[in-house]
Image (cartoon, coloured by chain):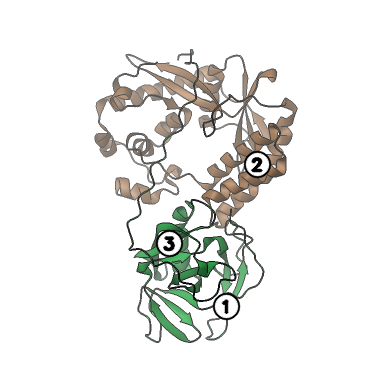
Amino acid sequence: MTQCSDGFAKHNIDHLSASSINLWSNAPDVWVMQYLHGKRTPMGAAAWRGICTEDAVAAILLGTPATEAIDKAIAKFDGRYMIGDEATTRERERIKPMATLAVAELQAYGKPDFPEVEEGENHQNKVEITAVGDGWSIPVIGYLDLVFPEHGLVIDLKTTGRIPTQMSPEHQLQRAIYAKAKGNLAVKFLYVSDKKTSLLEDGDPSELLAQAKVQISRMEAFLRHCDKDQAKAIVPMNTSSFYWSGAEALRKEFYGV
Amino acid sequence: MFSLDTGGNGANGPFLQWSARGTQDGAINAKSFYIRDGSDKTAYDASKGMVLDIEKMKTGWQKSEGIAGVAPEWKWNPSPAQMMAQPGEDWKKGFSIPVATGGGATATWEQAGTAAWQALTDLAPQLQQQPAPGQLPLVRLASTKAMQFKRGSTISPVLEVIKWVPRPDCLKDGAAAGIALAPAPAPAPVAAPAPVAPPAPAAAAAGDFEF
């Protein structure tokens, strides 16, 4: 087992992820609330649509009839947004076209490979690399959406309202972690809107991880120098950050503004 | 997912209503529920609990001319999870829910407008915890919430699920009138849902890449 030390061990943080590193870099106030005080911001309808769509895509690629898989995904969506508004309904209606387009793009690769797990467990392939600093080390983990070993390919599915021409820096870091962990496989991100798809693989993994290590080192030093209440008191705040979108009440409760 | 029969427009009275400001005739106090049966209005104490038939709930858009005696017009959504586009500027979000009000009596809570809609959407996270089909929430009026807008304000009821109960006879199709609903137990505080633990990491070989 990898030993955590100093700042991470002090706060019982035993691993990081791309989303944690990205959140620390972009919204340290949200990061402190979530990772040190255990208060999660609510998942938005778009994120939940993405999870439901991924479920449908994986099921269809594994042989479940498309109608059944999509109905199940929509039922899962409705389970969280039982009383819909215009925004949640818009996301709900995207599940079917997004799943259909993704499957059309991915069918050529055959059946993806998933680890055998017990019911209820995360069925995705876990990957892990380790960030090592001066007197500390911390695993950085991730979960792969779709692995096609016969094609030497990992695909991460990103459902989105608008297809980007270039991967965001946050997605590039996620891809870098996967690419380094699966050095013998190509890692591509499939962006899917309700109208089209795009397969991207931007960013140099080594450069991105070097940049990430700077952020992780600063995170470790920050953690080493304060307890969680001090962190809450001193962390810079950005109330206009989109990371607070939909969590304004939680921010008010936690930070008082 | 809750499916529903969207046929028909007319709900069965009597009707349960929330009054933020009290009724103009003074019969009903502000910040309270009442039951309207024809022209009769009776105060209803929702703090003791009422059973909402969420499996027959409908949501949609309501347009009211505001004329006494003229029923408002409704356009129902295909399902509560799907909100149609607003039909026009004069249409407000609303819902219709059969309610067991106690003593075997039923009413339909059919209401549009910000206060009632906010109450329902605030309650939704608790309603989504339905343990099994046929189990319905016994909810009570816990408090009220003042809402301020750029123009105007209102007061929304804050409801909470006390417990889940089997569908009472009075909310079953074809039930004879007067079948008693089991007396509502004394309201008890609802235990906060346990925090969801992060998924246990799947067994995986320790990463051998360091940076």
**Chain letter, colour green in render:** B
Residue beneath disc 1: B72
- Name the residue located 42 percent from the left edge and 45 percent from the top edge: A244
Q: What amino acid is at disc 2?
A: Ser
Compared to A162, does B187 lie above or below?
below
Total numbered labels = 3
x, y percent for residue B102: 42, 71
Labels 2, 1: front one: 1
Is there CB contact under 8 Å for labels 3 and 2?
A: no
Compared to A78, does B140 lie above or below?
below
The answer to whether A114 appears left or right of B151 in the picture is: right
Tag 2 subunit: A
Q: State the CA–CA distance, disc 2 to disc 1.
A: 39 Å
Q: Quadrant of the C terminus of chain B?
A: top left
The answer to whether A11 appears left or right of A166 in the picture is: left
Residue beneath disc 3: B138
Tag shown at residue A193: 2
x, y percent for residue B169: 51, 67
- Element type where label 2 sits in the image: loop
